Amino acid sequence: MSTELESLIHRYLDGTISAEEMTQLNARLRTEAEARRELAELLNLDSALAATAAGWVPENVEPSIAGLASRKLIAFPAAVRWLAAAACVILLAGGGWWWQAQRVFATVAKGAGVEEMSKGAKLHSETRELKAGTVELITARGARVVIEAPAE
């Protein structure tokens, strides 16, 4: 096949052929059996590649052993899928609880008469009881809060 014919056919298949080039290709197809044969072969190849890219498999083709093995790994029974989904939900809930427990809600700015809450101490989500003294907190959003005993 000539490089000129091959170039015309490829531009036709790519959809980039000009009107003048289409006229040339049609003229060659009318007069040359070899050009028609080449076009038919390249059209078959192009459609096979497009079908493969789209995931289509002909009915008369036996699936490969590798393909069967991968399908068995992916096709889990419904009970296993539900169990995996439940495990994911539990992990997400546990992770959310842990993150919430680790989150700093306030930092002690000043403390007077409060031994367990020194300046710079980070307060998480735990409950604290203030029996005596005063403490000034700065919340995670920057608000200043003064708490006087007795308080919880």
Image (cartoon, rainbow, N blue to C red):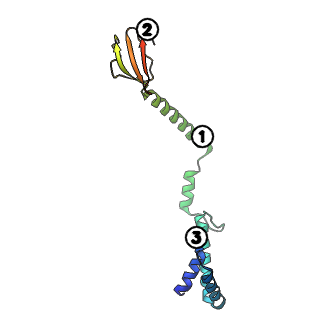
Q: In the image, residue 70 lies at what x, y percent?
A: 54, 56
Q: Nearer the viewer, mark 3 or mark 1?
A: 3
Residue visible at 54% across and 85% down in the picture: 4
In the foreground, 20 or 100: 20
Residue visible at 49% across and 29% down in the picture: 97
- Per the image, the residue denoted by label 1 is 82
Q: Is the residue marked by circle 2 packed among few (<14), some (14-19), or many (20+) residues within 10 Å? A: few
Going by the numbered disc 1, the residue's amino acid type is: Trp
User: In the figure, 56 relative to 33: above or below?
Assistant: above
- Per the image, the residue denoted by label 3 is 49
Contact check, label 1 and label 2, Cβ < 8 Å: no
- Identify the mark nearer the N-term, 3 or 2: 3
- State the separation of the CA atoms marked 1 and 2: 50 Å
Q: Is the residue marked by circle 1 packed among few (<14), some (14-19), or many (20+) residues within 10 Å? A: few
- Identify the mark nearer the N-term, 1 or 2: 1
Question: Element under label 2?
Answer: loop
User: In the figure, 132 relative to 95: above or below?
Assistant: above
Q: Quadrant of residue 37?
A: bottom right
Q: Nearer the viewer, mark 3 or mark 2?
A: 2
Q: Is the residue marked by circle 3 packed among few (<14), some (14-19), or many (20+) residues within 10 Å? A: few
Numbered tag placed on residue 150 in the rendering: 2
**Residue 20 can be seen in this image:** yes
Question: Element under label 1?
Answer: helix
Residue visible at 53% across and 87% down in the picture: 2
**Residue 129 can be seen in this image:** no
- Identify the mark nearer the N-term, 3 or 1: 3
Q: Quarter holding the C terminus?
A: top left
User: In the figure, 112 relative to 86: above or below?
Assistant: above
Left or right of residue 56, residue 149 in this image: left
Q: Quadrant of residue 123?
A: top left
Going by the numbered disc 3, the residue's amino acid type is: Leu
